[in-house]
Image (cartoon, rainbow, N blue to C red):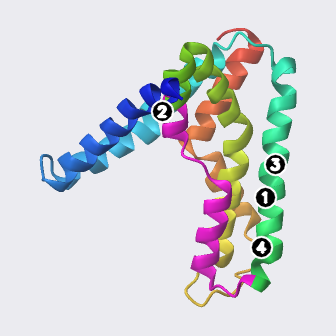
Amino acid sequence: MVDILTALVPLFAVIALGWGLRRHGAFGDAFWETAERLIFHVLFPALLIVKIGGAEVPGAELAPLSAVLFVTTAGVTAVVVALRPRLGLDGPAFVSILQGATRFNTYVGLAAAFALFGEAGLTLAAVCILAAIPLVNAVSVFAHLKWADPAGGDAGTPWRPALIATARNPIIVGCLIGAWLNLTGWG
């Protein structure tokens, strides 16, 4: 328990510091928007490329973990979608529930994995991201396109736009580049 606390307290302290700086206007909104874009489009994908590309664990050893993550995420998604008629929610509220059930906080997870288990934890967490993030992102984009209109009606089946948006996600691109580097041995 002490290891977990000593790993997570600094992480949440940094989050609180960022919140405090934003709340007290230490930096303008433009700074935060730029920082967020830099992290999402450059720094985080670069971290995934390096960690997945350089992972020393052969893909075959990670296949069971990846399969469990993928199947579990798909199963939770299917259950939530099947429950949609019984939930009585409009489209945006349902999309929020679906995302809450399937998405995880990748940034906090990576930081916690590194704090608790060092480089090995960071690498394993990056591989877990590779297994789950493409599916989670595709589900989220699909759900937004299908159900997030204010009336809550079904907007058809937006497969193509969901796949295009998913393929353009910098985190997914970083995961795929890292996987390619790992599989080719160039990582």
Tell me the quarter of the picture where residue 98 sits: bottom right
Q: Residue 108: horizontal and vertical position, in percent? A: 49, 38
Residue at 21% x, 54% y is: 29
In screen coordinates, is 27 left or right of 69?
left
Which residue corresponds to mark 1?
76
Q: Circle 3 sits in a helix, a strand or a loop, which is it?
A: helix
Asked if labels 2 and 3 touch by Cβ distance under 8 angstroms, the answer is no
Give, as a three-letter code, the residue at label 3. Thr
**Residue ID at (57%, 39%):** 171
Query: Distance between the Cα atoms at labels 4 and 2?
Result: 31 Å
Q: In which quarter of the image is the C terminus?
A: top right
- What residue is shown with label 3? 72
- The answer to which of marks 1 and 2 sits earlier in the sequence is 2
Q: How crowded is mark 2: few (under 14 residues within 10 Å), some or many (20 or more)?
A: some
Q: Of 106 and 182, which appears nearest the observer?
A: 106
Q: Mark 2 points at which residue?
A: 44
Residue occupied by mark 4 = 157
Residue 38 percent location from the top left of the image: 37, 38
Label located before the other in sequence (3 or 2): 2
Neighbourhood count class around disc 4 (C-alpha, 10 Å): few under 14, some 14–19, many 20 upward: few
- Picture residue at 48% right of the left edge, 30% below the top: 111
Q: Is residue 134 left or right of residue 60?
A: left
Q: Which of 127 and 134 is in front in this view?
A: 127
Disc nearest the viewer among 1 and 2: 1
Residue at the far bottom: name it. 151
Magenta residues? 87-111
Rendering coords of residue 124 (x, y %) = 67, 23
Disc 1 and disc 2: Cα gap in Å?
A: 26 Å
